[in-house]
Image (cartoon, rainbow, N blue to C red):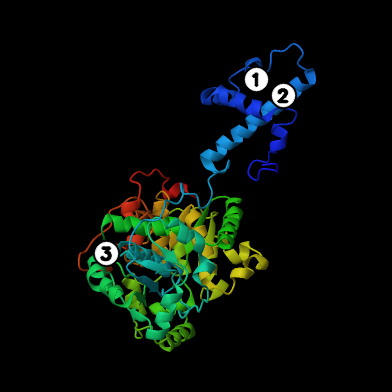
């Protein structure tokens, strides 16, 4: 060789200085493979090594003796390094890395049957559930999924792309053993789409896998590339267990937020944890929520008129004429801040607990929040816990801001949503997956009736509090069977609220009265 070995850093000259090369090579060969193994590991004593390697002549020069011992040890180290190289090419190859095969199994070997493109619709959590469904569909139809496009036309007009919210490289690699995911169509297909156009369709809502096998799959055979224009509730709640587990794998393992979002979420949690337990309140009392639902409890006449104008101004909100009183009595309205405060006290939630408000701007601002703050003074939100500089990268992106709230919601001691929207449903399911963390799912139909009875004097406080607790004894995020109504999916429990096929069956947790 004569030069430094690129792998091991030894020089051949050093191994043969002042010694006959042929004689040394023959001596090593004579030792035999097994003895060499023991020599390398230090099992044989140095005097044994001398007896194997040194001449017996009494005139042997002392200097040559020292040089022989040194060069022999260098050779043995060199042989040892070569043995390691032959075992793994790289001494550090056993270190677990991000793309280690032990962490990400080798991709499933299947024939690609086409390319699926999807345009997600809705807010962060609606899109999240839709993405999980799309991966499951691609997996079981042997399709290649193009990284989903996110909704930029919804009420919030958020221009974030997938890579701005989720770690796209982790998403692709972590699912590599199940489904092939790519960032863009290959050049050949891009040219084909430009030439022939892109076939797009709206899959039916709440479909089972037979619909995709029998009705949708032939279109990939025909067009090769198909785009789904909607992703919300394109799969039913109750499907074969292997499909359910695939949905869970995407939701709870593959969809990891970007490092920037993850780190800022952890910072909020550290600040909260530094002051003790905290409850996340998903207070759905934003202007758009009230306008869309037609709910106006607690609003004055000018506010009711403003909300009505907004509802009529947005064409894709189909319901225009709404009776707010009957809707509230049917349990279809989000709680007001005052109703929320009364409910929290009925559960015996400690008045001094930190309450993190996971929501947008509360309609009516501090004036409306005053009723809640009178009962629970430790109200905080990300805007009060973080500096403007911390929030600046996320400020104009509603879905990225919602992602911060999502992370804090997962880690809270108690999670309580005042309305059963997409975030409430998806977070509840995720908290179940994390060990049935306490989530109070309000029965607003019962609760509103009890609140009205308490306010008009029909129920005393103790009676009211006991009735609220009794009505919610089985609505704390503990193990339960998902309700099924074949043929009526809208009446069923939502899969992402209770993904029971993926959940542990044992839970030990504190009752709500001890969480303050």
Q: Viewer-nearest of labels 3 and 1? A: 1
Q: Which residue occupies 33% across, 50% down?
A: 479
- Indicate left or right for 219 with 175 as reference: left
Q: Residue 34 versus residue 237: which sits nearer the camera?
A: 34
Name the disc covering residue 13, or none.
Answer: none
Which quarter of the rendering shows the N terminus?
A: top right
Tell me the element at label 2: helix
In the image, 370 versus 66, the foreground residue is 66
**What's the CA distance linking mark 2 and mark 3?**
83 Å
Q: Earlier in the sequence, mark 2 or mark 1?
A: 1
Q: Is residue 226 visible?
A: yes
- Where residue 35 appears, x then y in whole percent? 55, 22
Question: In the figure, 192 relative to 58: above or below?
Answer: below
- What x and y, as percent, mark residue 175? 42, 58
Percent x, y for residue 298?
45, 75
The answer to whether residue 377 of the structure is visible from this angle is no
Label placed on residue 53: 1
Label 2 to label 1: alpha-carbon separation: 9 Å
In the picture as drawn, the residue positioned furthest to the top comes out as 58
Q: Quadrant of residue 117?
A: bottom left
Badge 3 is on which residue? 492
Front position in the image: 228 or 102: 102
Q: Secondary structure at mark 1?
A: helix
Which mark is first along the chain, 3 or 2? Answer: 2
Residue 382 picture location, percent across and down? 58, 64
Badge 1 density bin: few <14, some 14–19, many ≥20, Cα 10 Å = some
Q: State the residue at coordinates (62%, 18%).
A: 52
Helix, strand or loop status at disc 3:
loop
Q: Which residue is mark 2?
A: 68
Q: Quadrant of residue 230?
A: bottom left
Q: Which badge, 3 or 1, comes first in the chain's sequence?
A: 1
């Amino acid at each position: 060789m004569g030069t430094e070995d690129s792998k091991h850093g030894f020089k051949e000259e050093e191994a043969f200085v002042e010694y006959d090369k042929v004689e040394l090579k023959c001596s090593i060969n004579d030792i035999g493979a097994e003895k060499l193994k023991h020599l390398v590991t230090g099992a044989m004593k140095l005097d044994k090594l001398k007896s194997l390697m040194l001449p017996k002549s009494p005139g042997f020069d002392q200097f040559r003796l020292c040089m022989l011992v040194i060069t022999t040890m260098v050779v043995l180290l060199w042989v040892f390094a070569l043995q390691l190289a032959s075992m793994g090419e790289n001494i550090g190859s056993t270190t677990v890395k991000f793309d280690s095969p032990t962490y990400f199994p080798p991709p499933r070997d299947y024939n690609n049957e086409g390319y699926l493109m999807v345009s997600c619709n809705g807010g962060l959590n609606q899109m999240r559930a839709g993405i999980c469904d799309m991966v499951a569909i691609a997996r079981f139809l042997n399709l290649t999924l193009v990284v989903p496009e996110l909704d930029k036309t919804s009420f919030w007009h958020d221009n974030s792309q997938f890579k701005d919210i989720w770690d796209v490289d982790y998403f692709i690699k972590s699912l590599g053993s199940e489904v092939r995911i790519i960032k863009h169509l290959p050049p050949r297909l891009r040219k084909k789409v430009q030439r022939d156009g892109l076939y797009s369709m709206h899959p039916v809502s709440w479909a089972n896998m037979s619909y995709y096998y029998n009705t949708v799959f032939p279109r990939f055979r025909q067009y090769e590339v198909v785009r789904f224009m909607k992703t919300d509730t394109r799969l039913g709640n109750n499907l074969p267990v292997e499909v359910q587990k695939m949905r869970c794998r995407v939701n709870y393992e593959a969809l990891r937020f970007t490092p920037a979002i993850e780190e800022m979420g952890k910072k909020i949690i550290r600040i909260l944890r530094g002051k003790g337990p905290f409850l996340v309140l998903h207070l759905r009392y934003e202007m758009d929520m009230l306008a869309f639902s037609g709910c106006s409890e607690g609003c004055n006449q000018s506010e009711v008129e403003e909300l009505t104008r907004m509802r009529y101004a947005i064409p894709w909100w189909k319901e225009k004429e709404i009776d707010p009183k009957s809707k509230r009595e049917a349990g279809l309205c989000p709680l007001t801040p005052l109703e929320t405060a009364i409910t929290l006290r009925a559960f015996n939630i400690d008045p001094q607990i930190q309450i993190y408000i996971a929501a947008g701007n509360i309609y009516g601002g501090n004036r409306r929040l005053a009723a809640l703050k009178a009962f629970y003074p430790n109200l905080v939100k990300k805007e009060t816990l973080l500096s403007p500089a911390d929030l600046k990268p996320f400020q104009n992106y509603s879905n990225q801001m919602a992602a911060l709230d999502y992370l804090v919601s997962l880690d809270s001691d108690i999670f309580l949503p005042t309305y059963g929207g997409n975030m409430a449903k998806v977070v509840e399911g995720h908290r179940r997956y994390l060990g049935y963390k306490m989530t109070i799912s309000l029965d607003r139909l019962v609760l509103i009736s009890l609140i009205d009875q308490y306010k008009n004097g029909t129920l005393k406080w103790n009676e009211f509090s006991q009735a609220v607790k009794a009505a919610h004894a089985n609505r704390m995020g503990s193990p339960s069977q998902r309700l099924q109504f074949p043929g009526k999916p809208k009446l069923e429990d939502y899969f992402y609220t209770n993904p029971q096929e993926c959940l542990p069956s044992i839970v030990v947790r504190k009752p709500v009265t001890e969480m303050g």
